[in-house]
Image (tube, grey):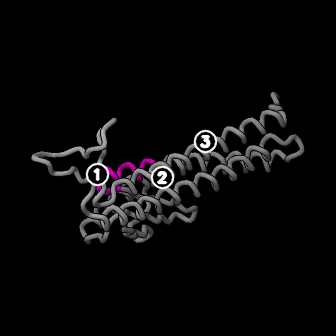
């Protein structure tokens, strides 16, 4: 039987790499927020190297965004979905790390390792299915969504939309039922603006 030995240095390297990726993602979010602030009404784009404003035609300044409330609500909604995904990534990362520790621990019983491997397989399949469903919901024309598959065969879906029509809900429910086999009454669909 082949046993896998992971050195502490390797674990620290992997943890540092994950931390670096998280910091990079946080930096991108900060940059995105700064770019969104630049798009507030009344702000103009300066021409490179000149003190004058860039114009559309006949001396009219180019306005980046004319509807501040739409921008703010879209940013708020987008931030919710980004934060949700980051929290989900952190939680799943901790679970995966713990399961790998159990699997790799030579003092763990074979039954415990088997259960950890099954849980790891379930978690991997769950993550893949959630991502697939989120892409399918986006393909239906929704700006963003999150899908949470629960172990008790229930699904919660949050869709970025001011409201959902009965047809929209039914379409999402049919899509998710087709993709997972979960019955419609076990699917909760919420709208988040």
- Residue in front for this viewpoint, 119 or 45: 45
Mark 3 residue crowding within 10 angstroms, few (<14) / some (14–19) / many (20+):
few
Which mark sits nearer the N-terminus, 2 or 1? 1
Residue, disc 2: 130
Asked if residue 138 lies in the magenta stretch, the reply is yes
Chief secondary structure of the magenta portion: helix
**Which mark lies nearer to you, 1 or 3?**
1
Residue, disc 1: 44
Q: Which residues are magenta?
A: 129-143
Residue at x-position 52% and y-position 59%: 83
Asked if residue 83 lies in the magenta stretch, the reply is no
**Which mark lies nearer to you, 3 or 2?**
3
Residue at x-position 26% and y-position 63%: 67
**Which mark lies nearer to you, 2 or 1?**
1
Residue, disc 3: 21
Mark 1 residue crowding within 10 angstroms, few (<14) / some (14–19) / many (20+):
some
Q: Secondary structure at mark 2?
A: helix
Which mark sits nearer the N-terminus, 3 or 2? 3
Q: Secondary structure at mark 1?
A: loop
């Amino acid at each position: 039987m082949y046993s896998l030995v992971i050195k502490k240095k390797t674990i620290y390297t992997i943890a540092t790499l994950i931390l670096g990726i998280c910091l990079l993602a946080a930096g991108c979010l900060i940059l995105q927020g700064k770019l969104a602030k630049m798009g507030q009404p009344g702000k103009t784009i300066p021409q490179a190297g000149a003190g004058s404003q860039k114009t559309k035609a006949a001396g009219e300044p180019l306005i980046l965004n004319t509807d501040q409330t739409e921008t703010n609500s879209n940013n708020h909604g987008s931030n919710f979905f980004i934060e949700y995904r980051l929290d989900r990534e952190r939680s799943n990362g901790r679970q995966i790390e713990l399961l790998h520790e159990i699997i790799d621990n030579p003092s763990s019983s074979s039954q415990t390792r088997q259960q950890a491997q099954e849980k790891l397989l379930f978690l991997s399949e769950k993550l893949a299915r959630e991502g697939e469903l989120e892409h399918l919901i986006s393909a239906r024309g929704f700006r963003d969504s999150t899908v949470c598959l629960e172990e008790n065969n229930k699904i919660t879906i949050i869709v970025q939309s001011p409201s959902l029509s009965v047809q929209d809900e039914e379409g999402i429910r049919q899509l998710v039922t087709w993709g997972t086999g979960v019955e419609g009454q076990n699917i909760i669909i919420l709208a988040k603006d």
